[in-house]
Image (cartoon, rainbow, N blue to C red):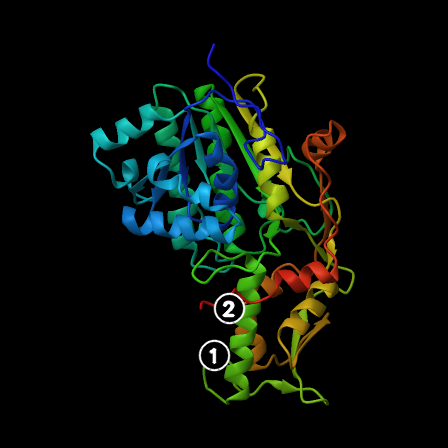
Amino acid sequence: MPDTVHSTEQAAGLPYERPTGSTIAMSGATGFLASHLLLRLLPHDTGVVALVRKPPHRALASLACALRSAGAPAGTVERIPRQVRAVQVRLDRPQLGLTDREFRTIADSVDAVWHCAALTKLHGAAEELHRTNVEGTRQILALATAGSRRPPLFHISTAFVAGAQLEGVVPERQLESTRGFLTPYEESKYRAEKLVHHWARDNSRSATVFRPSVLLSDRRALPRAPQHTYAVLAAKLALFLRHSLNGAPDPAPSPASGRTGQLVVRLLGAPDAGINLLQVEDAALAMLRLAGRTPSGPGARVHHIVHPAETPVERVNDALQRSVPRLRLELVADRPDPTSLERAVDQYGAEATAYLGLRRHYERSSLADLERRGLISPPAPIDSSYLDAVLSPPTPTR
């Protein structure tokens, strides 16, 4: 029997047993979520084949920055040269743009495949989203299929494959499109997840689908490190505001002005709407706990990686206003004659506008079971003080 590593949360290590010396392939390894996964995987001697867009030396530098930003100690970052091999790929190309020999060598060398890469532009061009999110998933599935070790697949989907279901409880087993989608991004991720389900069924293989909600961190990101959605949103709103105050024609001139000199942005939404936000540290730990479960057989297993409580949209807007002085966000049911600033926020700040009418909740049976067994702790509340920390600007360079 191979040796195993027993980890603990206190050691911030891999939270399940695994054979030592195992190797994973990971797409999107330099991203926000992936860096938090690797933060826990690298200290336990996990080998990583990082499937990246950049040339290898640049990708490894980006990974080191991402890990430091995620809070990795120096010893973890120092593991990169000996544990991580970066391979430049094209996600939307057959065999990831690699030669037959390169593709086969990688496929045969890994014990698991983690697909974390995605294009996350909510209102991105449908063709571009399809290339990255759908065709990219197809090529990752081909890699998992070709591997002689029959590696299990771990696929990062999104809770927003629920699309235009605005109310009620979204089951973990549900994946249907009858209600349509609120954004092109959701539809692309739905189609990608459908591929995973079909692959597991048709090939009698094991796949685990994680559907995270909006992931956040209250750590101040380092410059050039990957940032979470709301940090990017706050930076966009600050940019819109600066352009508006300067009277610049792009992206948003002539905004509405409040009586106190504030710039007013009316957002279409409901005052009782909520958005599911979850700390990325809790998400990464839960995913690794669930990844350690022994599959009961072939097929795709779906886990919502979500907070037990929706965060009121009004609370998020209040925090955004505190982070961007002189900006006032108003939720309205109707908005005749939108200003150019409002149109700019709709187009470029979809993170603030796409999900302001949701009253739905998500089944979280998988996480509740882990909490009952004491394998993870329930996440802390997403309160105003946490949101203020979340929206702090990146740590300046010295």
Residue at position x 37%, y 35% from top?
A: 83
Amino acid under disc 1: Pro
Q: Residues within 10 Å of mark 1 (few under 14, many from 20)?
A: some
In screen coordinates, is 166 left or right of 396? right
Question: How far apart in space, not on screen, are marks 1 and 2 (Cα)?
Answer: 9 Å
According to the picture, the residue beneath numbered tag 2 turns out to be 348
Judge whether residue 175 can be spotted in this image.
no
Is 341 above or below relative to 351? below
Amino acid under disc 2: Tyr
Lower position in the chain sequence, tag 1 or tag 2: 1
In screen coordinates, is 121 left or right of 146? right
Query: Can you tell which quarter of the image residue 384 is in?
Result: bottom right
Give the total number of marks visible in the rendering.
2
Residue 45 location, x and y as percent?
A: 44, 30
Residue at position x 56%, y 45% from top?
A: 158
Element on which disc 1 rests:
loop
Front in this rendered view, residue 322 or 90 = 322
User: Do the CB atoms of the residues marked 1 and 2 lie less than 8 Å apart?
Assistant: yes
Residue at position x 58%, y 43% from top?
A: 177
Is 370 above or below relative to 386? above
Q: Quadrant of the C terminus?
A: bottom left
In screen coordinates, is 389 left or right of 40? right
Judge whether residue 224 can be spotted in this image.
yes
According to the picture, the residue beneath numbered tag 1 turns out to be 251
